[in-house]
Amino acid sequence: MKKRLLTIVIALVLVSQVGMAQYEGGHGFSFRYLGIDSYSPYGDVQDDGSLGFDFDRERAFEEMQQGVEMTYHYGIRDYLAISVPFKTGLFRQRDVRLDSLQQFSVAADNVMLYSLGTRLKLSAKFKKDQILVPYLSAGIDATKIGDNDMAMQFPIEAGLNLRVANNFYLSASTEYRVSSDEIQDKNNRSLTNNMMHAIGFHWHWGTKEDETPPPPPPPPVVEEPSDKDGDGVVDEEDTCPDVAGLAKFAGCPDTDGDDIQDSADDCPEVAGIAAFNGCPDTDGDGLADNKDECPTEAGSISNNGCPVKVEDRDNDGVEDSADDCPDTPGAAAFNGCPDTDGDGVADKNDQCPSTPGKKALNGCPDKDGDGVADKSDKCPTTAGPASNNGCPEIKTEDKETLTFATQAVEFETGKSVIRSSSYPVLDKIADIMAKYPNYSMTISGYTDNVGNDENNRKLSEKRARACYDYLVGKGVAGNRMFSTGYGEESPVADNSTKEGRQRNRRVEFNIFLK
């Protein structure tokens, strides 16, 4: 029985020397029988009780177990493919134990093996119709052996495939699988490094490997009739054989496209009408442009196509005697003056002549409808009184919040770290800035007179900047705020008392319109 199995394996290896599947961008499926060899990578325990690697081929063959493999393939190139193999079968689990006498022993048991992974396969393909193609593949598998934990294995495979039909192949390979569960001294872990040998078939679909059919014979050469000007009218029928033209004019051109061929057109480069032999009458006064002294102004034939002249320097249809703007074209409704933006206010009286506006605001717009023209409105999209430049006034309670914040914002002693108790009032300031989007704010830091002047100035500047950074973190745009430190300057109380120094250590928040 041993010799028969060995003969079958050798025969399959020899058969496998004949080929490799050609994927050519298609999909594939393979089914193979597995010989799972868990013995050969490790050797065995020696007669003296030590762990050695004296490989016993006959015993290794006896301990080889069986399994099957099913694999999906996808060809990326003729020589490169990705595959996803699933393997299952029996595994000869062998535990190596070290006893108190420092002697090794081996216990073996058959357990189920399950493995799922992915491979990158490189084929030695040199020509399209190559039959024998060896390949190498490598990848990673997740493997479950008996009751052991899931282990990662890194297989390296060498094989050959034999093409026996356009879409059908025989396949044989051997792979060595290195496991993440490696043998170590003084433990009882299973030896999971192993080898696998496989034989089977591969089938693929989605491509054709037929030989490329020969190109069709060229069509017979037919001698074309002469057409020197290339206008589609053969010279025999072309009245103008040297100039490209139209078939309806026997090959002669109509340059201006007015449906009158050039030879009968008095104005061959300007589209016109048949009544004037192809010349236009732009102003429609019944006189062709080539005879009209005023071709763009309707006039009388008796005046050579020109209108009777009146004094109208800007030609706006309003005589200069009644034209308030005689040198600028305008409308009769405005006594000859223009209204560029069409808002019903003549430009001469319009303070915003290029933007439609309201008559009450001398032609200027007021988008927010607060009665303040946009050009003078610092908040053109938010209604506010004229006394505040068109911006909404700061409410009394919001002003009080800003005043309260002067003393309410506190810092760690001698530092620029804001105390958490100050966060609520700073959050209210952020809400105020969101409520008045057209306003900006200065953040000014001050200290008492205790300590070095320059140190106090730097500390006040850092504290003001800390408030600035906090408000930016709450969504206030940085370009709407300006932080400055003034140190001991501008005290608001007597620095000789504790209460006065407390009041002088402050951060002021002032909101303003740019």
Image (cartoon, rainbow, N blue to C red):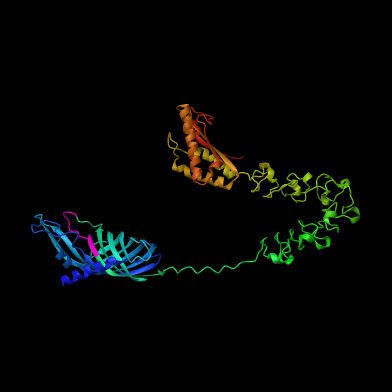
Q: Residue at x 25, y 60 (%)?
A: 177
- Quarter in which the C terminus is drawn: top right
Residue 17 among those drawn in magenta: no
Q: What's drawn in magenta, residue-wise?
A: 184-196
Near-viewer residue (424 or 246): 246
In x, y percent, where is residue 287?
Answer: 86, 57
Can you say whether 12 is above or below 385 in the image?
below
Residue 347 visible in rendering: yes
In x, y percent, where is residue 476?
Answer: 53, 45
Near-viewer residue (499 or 231): 231
Magenta segment main secondary structure: loop
Near-viewer residue (288 or 190): 288
Residue 88 visible in rendering: no
Near-viewer residue (471 or 66): 66
Q: Is residue 363 left or right of residue 172?
A: right
In x, y percent, where is residue 192?
Answer: 22, 60
In x, y percent, where is residue 107?
Answer: 14, 63
Q: Is residue 128 left or right of residue 463?
A: left
> Farthest residue in the right direction?
302
The quadrant holding residue 126 is bottom left
